[in-house]
Image (cartoon, rainbow, N blue to C red):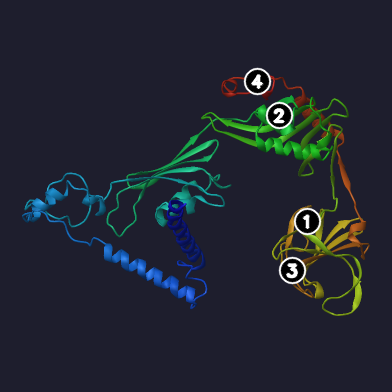
């Protein structure tokens, strides 16, 4: 019993010491966050701990002393350059690494660095860009730009297509204070014409190279699967032609009613140069054969100076349907209201569209401008006469883009949204007149339908029959470069 008691006492005391130390460590925060409780006893305790640790680290540091080494003899400058050229040090001095000889008495400094005899550049026509601006950005002098534009101006009257590459060579200049002369310029002015401008005997001369272009239309037929777009793209139809096709068909039927198994028929303008380049033009024919429902045959035809889509019967698009005159939400309706500026209730003889300042304003339908200018509280105002006693008015414009007596078409820009006249902010005040009196613009819709007749109808039907009777097949060299199967794509005369 005595042995047991003597051996157990120290163990109990040891456990009590450890317990007390653990309790003390839990109660005392030795490393508190110095960003919290600044100035408290705990904070000063943490600060003392930090200083103590820093002092211990500095005291125990080994110090920074240079390592002893054997002294090296000093090298002369030529020998030092020779050694340095074989070191990695030159990489930090402009990357002049590599073995080279140090300068000697035979080396003489150049007064000026020699220039390259020619500079070859490849520029590109940007969007909303011109040939002259592209040449100026490439470093061509203003005199050479003016000469080039005078020589090729007639060939690029409609402008150069964006993305067209320009091959430019600038020659040697007579002195450093003068621009380099243009020695060569080559680019594609049109699909059917390549131009080269070369300096011969100090004078710029132009060389025109005509390129044969096959203008045979492209016809694409196929069966609709999951969607018209995917099926037509799989058959090789250009995206531009498919988008036009969908817009035309959507005016006749609901595209949601088209089912798998229906057949589409697309004919579009197609221009292919003998050098391999190709351009897709406008859609000419849109056809749809449906398993249930009537078929659709739409042909683009120019009548009375206007190109539009006609059905097989010769009935054209509905024209004159009132459309939204601006892109924006309707903020005020037709009827009695309290005027926001005058402060009393009066008739609001139109509807207001809230739109951003400067947004384009479009003609709601075809008409003739009967008024254009300032008009009292309307500010900048345009009025269009549409016939049959109907007219529309557009007020509070920031700028007018239509003149008196001008004939405008539906969707044509006639002005821009502003806040002129009695207005509290940018918006469009839109009015509709019937026999000179204002009426609610939302209550009137009027349409006119074009109908071909006589010789024009006969010519239209002949053209439609010609397109619909085209045989499927790829003639000549076109077939070699065509990927779609012959039963899907045809180039036709």
Residue 85 vertical placement versus 375 (above, below): above
Compare marks 2 and 3 and give the one earlier in the sequence. 2
Residue 343 vertical placement versus 264 (above, below): below
1 vs 2, front mark: 2
Label 3 secondary element = loop
Q: What x and y, as percent, mark residue 267?
A: 71, 30
Residue 334 vertical placement versus 492 (above, below): below
Q: What's the mark number on residue 485?
A: 4
- The Cα–Cα distance between marks 3 and 4, rounded to whole angstroms, is 56 Å
- The Cα–Cα distance between marks 4 and 1, rounded to whole angstroms, is 48 Å
Write down the residue under mark 2: 231
- The Cα–Cα distance between marks 1 and 3, rounded to whole angstroms, is 27 Å
Write down the residue under mark 1: 407
Label 1 secondary element = strand
Within-10-Å neighbours for mark 3: few <14, some 14–19, many 20+: many
Label 2 secondary element = helix
Compare marks 4 and 1 and give the one earlier in the sequence. 1
Write down the residue under mark 3: 426
Label 4 secondary element = loop
- The Cα–Cα distance between marks 4 and 2, rounded to whole angstroms, is 13 Å
2 vs 3, front mark: 2
Say whether residue 107 is visible. no
Compare marks 1 and 3 and give the one earlier in the sequence. 1
Q: Residue at the location (86% across, 75% down)?
A: 339
Within-10-Å neighbours for mark 1: few <14, some 14–19, many 20+: some
Quarter residue 479 falls in: top right
């Amino acid at each position: 019993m005595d042995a047991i008691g003597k051996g157990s006492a120290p163990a109990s005391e040891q456990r009590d010491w450890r317990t007390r130390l653990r309790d003390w460590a839990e109660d005392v925060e030795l490393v508190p966050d110095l960003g919290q409780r600044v100035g408290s006893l705990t904070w000063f305790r943490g600060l003392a701990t930090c200083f103590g640790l820093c002092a211990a680290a500095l005291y125990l540091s080994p110090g920074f002393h240079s390592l002893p080494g054997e002294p090296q003899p000093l090298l002369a400058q030529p020998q030092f350059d020779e050694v340095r050229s074989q070191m990695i040090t030159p990489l930090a001095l402009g990357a002049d690494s590599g073995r080279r000889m140090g300068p000697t008495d035979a080396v003489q400094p150049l007064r000026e660095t020699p220039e390259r005899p020619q500079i070859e550049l490849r520029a590109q026509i940007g969007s909303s860009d011109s040939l002259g601006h592209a040449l100026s950005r490439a470093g061509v002098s203003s005199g050479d730009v003016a000469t080039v534009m005078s020589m090729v101006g007639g060939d690029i009257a409609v402008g150069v297509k964006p993305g067209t590459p320009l091959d430019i060579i600038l020659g040697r200049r007579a002195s450093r204070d003068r621009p380099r002369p243009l020695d060569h310029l080559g680019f594609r002015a049109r699909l059917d014409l390549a131009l080269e401008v070369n300096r011969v005997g100090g004078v710029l001369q132009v060389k025109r190279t005509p390129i044969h272009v096959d203008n045979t239309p492209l016809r694409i037929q196929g069966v609709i699967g999951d969607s018209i777009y995917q099926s037509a793209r799989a058959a090789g139809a250009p995206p531009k032609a498919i988008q036009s096709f969908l817009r035309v068909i959507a005016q006749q039927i609901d595209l949601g009613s088209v089912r798998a198994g229906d057949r589409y028929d697309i004919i579009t303008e197609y221009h292919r140069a003998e050098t391999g380049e190709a351009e897709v033009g406008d859609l000419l024919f849109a056809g749809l054969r449906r398993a249930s429902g009537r078929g659709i045959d739409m042909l683009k035809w120019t009548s009375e100076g206007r190109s539009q889509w006609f059905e097989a019967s010769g009935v054209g698009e509905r024209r004159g349907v009132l459309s939204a005159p601006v892109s924006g939400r309707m903020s005020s309706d037709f009827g009695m209201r309290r005027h926001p500026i005058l402060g009393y209730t009066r008739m609001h003889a139109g509807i207001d569209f809230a739109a951003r300042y400067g947004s384009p304003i479009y003609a709601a339908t075809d008409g003739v401008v009967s008024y254009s200018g300032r008009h009292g509280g309307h500010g900048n105002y345009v009025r269009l006469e549409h016939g049959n006693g109907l007219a529309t008015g557009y007020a509070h414009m920031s700028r007018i883009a239509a003149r008196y007596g001008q004939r405008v078409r539906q969707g044509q820009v006639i002005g821009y949204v502003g806040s002129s006249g009695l207005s509290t902010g940018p918006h469009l005040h839109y009015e509709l007149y019937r026999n000179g009196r204002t009426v609610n613009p939302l209550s009137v819709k009027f349409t006119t339908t074009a109908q071909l007749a006589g010789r024009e109808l006969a010519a239209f039907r002949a053209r439609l029959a010609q397109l619909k009777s085209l045989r499927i097949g790829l003639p000549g060299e076109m077939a070699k470069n065509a990927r779609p199967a012959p039963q899907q794509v045809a180039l036709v005369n």
